[in-house]
Amino acid sequence: MSQPKRQLRLGAFLMSSGHHVAAWRHPDTPVDAGLNFQHFRQITETAERGKFDMIFFADGVAVRQRGQSVEAISRSLVVHFEPLTLLSALSVVTEHIGLAATASTTYNEPYHLARKFASLDYLSGGRAGWNLVTSATDAEAYNFNREEHMEHGKRYERAREFVDVVTKLWDSWEDDAFIRDKESGVYFEPDKMHIPHHKGPHFSVRGPLNVARPPQGYPVIIQAGSSGDGQDLAAHTAEVVFTAQQTLAEAQDFYSGLKTKVAQAGRNPDHVKIMPGVFPVIGETEAEAEEKYEILQELIHPYVGLGLLSGMIGGFDLSTYPVDGPLPELPETNGGKSRQKLLSDLANRNNFTIRQLYLAIAGARGHRTILGTPQTIADQLEDWFVNGGADGFNIMPPYLPGGLDTFVTTVIPELQRRGLFRREYEGKTLRENLGLPRPENKFLAQTDAPERVAVGASV
């Protein structure tokens, strides 16, 4: 029997107004998009109609200010829903699409996140995904009793232990622990509860979790760091990796390198889906796509463009440098190391000035920009997919709702016509649709399992 044709995976990466830094100014975007539930409901239903694997909300726990002037911040969309709250609401009005959000391992505690994502997995019937990040800015540190952001290596060390604690908490109960027998009065079988008793360098957590094991076993674990530390974390923990590359050669190098690291970590490389971000601007003709892009580019205020770039290169203030001069030599950042390198390489490869660089990233923010017709957009996605650059893509609509509507009504049918993308969802859970296995309860796999509580014992 022949094997089914490999299918690409698609995430809809949804910023409130869209990914372009000036998207909130677009005439077809709701001005209150960040706090407009009906807007989010509409775009999520559009993504589900297009059979996307998941929607994804990025998040940070601060109004980002590093390297940006007050003038820049005052011209930027800075208020939006807390994503897990929003996803919980969206779970009620959707049936199939995965619901994923960022949550930081630096500014949260494992018990809190384990509980919230387990709850979302139940509310959605097994559609939750956690994008694990270590955060990147001092602005976040200031909101959590710190004067500076934790050092890069320490953040990833904490993150590795954080995931270990969270998964232990999700495994606190065996899948069939809760018998809820009214006649006998037994709610759960005591020997199917496991108490983690975790003690490590960063966390001391007894457990168990007060939510049953999630429907998916674990919500799908996503990771977005591409630095050396980030790739090492992904190789050991991630099931989906969001990444940013500009060329097929760069994507192939990252793809093969990370898949090798996954195998070296003792995991199946097919169980880690690599999904680069793509910012598509679509027109009936190439000229129309260019015109749509220029409409957005003309809405960029120089303060905003310069502030965006300053923040993305690690918080280095560029305001004292000539905007039409070259990008200066940058000091090593304690923020996003891989993004700083990507942008420096982009400037050097194209001989960009500071102004040209901020204009180049104002939409995709370091991810790949594609302008074209539905056919040429599909051509480029197919090229990366079949030539070892990606398992799928995280689609970044330029503005919302129109940018996503156009992708769903024009590019998705083209991908389906080529046999590259589903026409119907394969399963009910995000794991099933991504082709990921349901994880085994790690306590059942251990010969020296942690404490089981005897009948009548105090918890």
Image: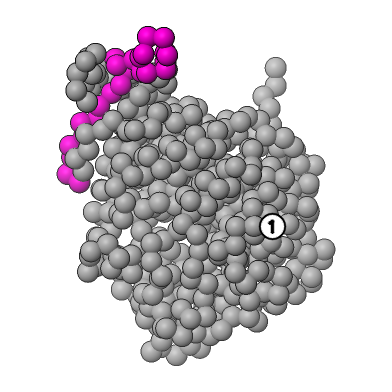
Question: In the image, 308: left or right of 314?
Answer: right
Which region is colored magenta? 179-202
Image: 450 above or below 96? above
Of 69 and 251, which appears nearest the observer? Answer: 69
Q: Specify whether 341 is left or right of 159.
A: right
Q: Amino acid at mark 1?
A: Leu
Q: Report which quarter residue 459 is drawn in.
A: top left
Image quarter in which the N terminus is found: top right
User: On the image, numbered disc 1 is attached to which residue?
Assistant: 404
* Left or right of residue 256: residue 165: left
**Residue drawn at 67 percent across, 45 percent down:** 48
Residue 235, placed above or below residue 442: below
Q: Residue at x 19, y 18 (%)?
A: 457
User: Which coloring applies here?
Assistant: one colour
Residue at 43% across / 37% down in the picture? Answer: 118
In magenta segment, residue 196:
yes
Residue 273 located within the stretch drawn in magenta: no
Determine if residue 102 is in view.
yes
Q: Residue furthest top?
A: 184
Q: Residue at x 25, y 60 (%)?
A: 150
Question: Can you see residue 248?
Answer: no
Q: Position of residue 105 (x, y in %)?
A: 33, 50
Image coords of residue 447 (percent x, y): 25, 15
Question: Mark 1: few, some, or many residues within 10 Å (few <14, many ≥20)?
Answer: many
Residue furthest right as drawn: 284
x then y, percent, for residue 115 = 37, 39
Locate residue 52, reporting x and y percent.
Answer: 65, 44
Number of labels in the image equals 1
Is 308 drawn above or below residue 169 in the view shown? below
SS under mark 1: helix
